[in-house]
Image (cartoon, rainbow, N blue to C red):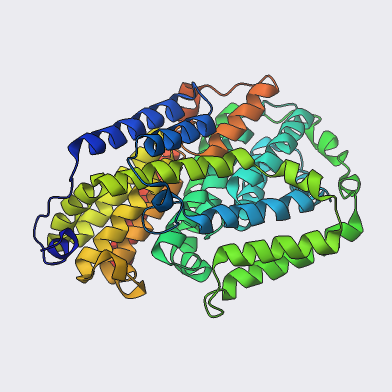
Amino acid sequence: MTQEAAAIHGAEPALIANPTHAIAAAAIFVIAYALIATERVHRTVVAIAGAAAVLALRLVDQSVAFGGGHAGVDWNVVFLLLGMMIIVAVTQRTGIFQWVAIKAAKASRGQPVRAILLMSVVTAVLSAFLDNVTTVLLTAPISMLIADGLGISPIPMLIAQIMASNIGGTATLIGDPPNIMIGSAAKLGFLDFIAHLAPIAVIAFGAFAGIMVLQFRRELKTPLDAAERVAGFDESRAITDPKLCRRCLVVLGITLLGFFIHQPLHLQPATVALAGAALLLVVSRVEIDGVLRQVEWSTLLFFVGIFVMVSALVETGIIGVGTGWLAARADASPGAMAVVVLWVSAVASGVLGSIPLVAAANPMLVELAARLGGVPLSGVGAAQLHSAPMLAFWWALALGACLGANFTLIGAAANVVVAGVADKHGHPISFMGYLRYGIPTTLATIILCHFYLVLRYL
């Protein structure tokens, strides 16, 4: 009986054919995790070095690593991100994002807590329909200016934006990189994420907002002249190119519509994003070199490196061992294991980072779908991936990874980006100082997700 056949029939196959290779793949991945978490070396450098190591040691064949299959780089994720980065890079030139932020600040009427909540709403909504990393790159500098205009410390507003970006990004397929990865692996579409995750994301945002009000109301006092300062903001100067702005908004609307209907059209999300990017480049007539310089190539290469390292874990059998452990327990109590996935992924996301966590978890859940569905790995399709037990696992992973990222300052790329902006402007956010806000928000939102999963799927 082959290893795959044994897995289907419930036997315990010899998943690790070469223990030395398995240990080497696991060691490289753990070392990379540690370096990424400690930030001693740039995360993209770590990912590329780890990918080079597993390829050089022949822990995974290059054709497998770059093949884009079950054990390889997920090019749908990479090109979806690339397409959206191009759209945002062009749209950013118009000043529309700054216009929205200034309007929100003026609506606060100089009250710091209200300003924080309104900017959090803006950040959450933008994160849902762009992506959270791009959103905080746009809004964090604006928040610094708003805080300066109000005469308050920018740190509370920046911390709130971190959390709002991760919560807002939870709601859609394109809002947070972990969701993009999960959607691609599980063959889940844009509407699937809206239907299943948007409701709990809205509830989680409400809980987060309540916690922020309680915490910041005691810390922030409204300056006497704050209202006059905010009234002096001029949003009319934010829109630098009205004609380009209109074109960008039309193309962005078409692209979002494409995400809503991509499944009936049998198109991958990456195809929609690239088509939108191409259309915008044509109608905007902007200089392509300038746009490409704004693409976050380091982020894309980071994804490629992580995928290659994970492919080594799959090929050497490490992922199969984890799948076997999970499958044995999922058969007996799928509901309990889905809740375990939620809490474990939440803690792991906060401590180790959401992207590496999901990159490692995705192939494990795909193999689990094959085992529970009684089909070979090569035959896994929507019927197996979307069975009732598996949907609970996918949504538990998404919620744990996205919302658990609020736990620490290194939980997600958006967290690190905002911390970098704050430090650059002389307002460093300490790791321990952030925990004062991250722990209660994460705990409250994950508890809500726990009940949401139980009531809706288990």
Vertical comparison of 233 with 315: above or below: above
Vertical comparison of 226 with 136: above or below: above
Q: Is residue 429 left or right of residue 341?
A: right
Of 424 and 5, nearer the camera is 5
Measured from the top left, where is residue 38 in percent x and y?
A: 44, 24
Measured from the top left, where is residue 268 in percent x and y?
A: 54, 68
Image label count = 0
Q: In this view, does 168 lie to the left or right of 404?
A: right
Residue at 43% from the left image edge and 57% from the top image edge? 182
| Residue that sits furthest to the bottom in the current view | 264
Of 62 and 13, nearer the camera is 62
Of 126 and 189, nearer the camera is 189
Residue at 59% from the left image edge and 47% from the top image edge? 132
Quarter of the image that includes the N terminus? bottom left
Residue at 44% from the left image edge and 42% from the top image edge? 306
Query: Where on the picture, by quarter, is residue 223?
Result: top right
Measured from the top left, where is residue 56 in percent x and y?
A: 40, 35
Q: Is residue 443 visible?
A: no
Quarter of the image that includes the C terminus? bottom left
Measured from the top left, where is residue 235 in percent x and y?
A: 86, 47
Q: Is residue 284 visible?
A: yes
Q: In this view, does 308 lie to the left or right of 341?
A: right
Residue at 31% from the left image edge and 62% from the top image edge? 392
Query: Where on the picture, by quarter, is residue 229?
Result: top right
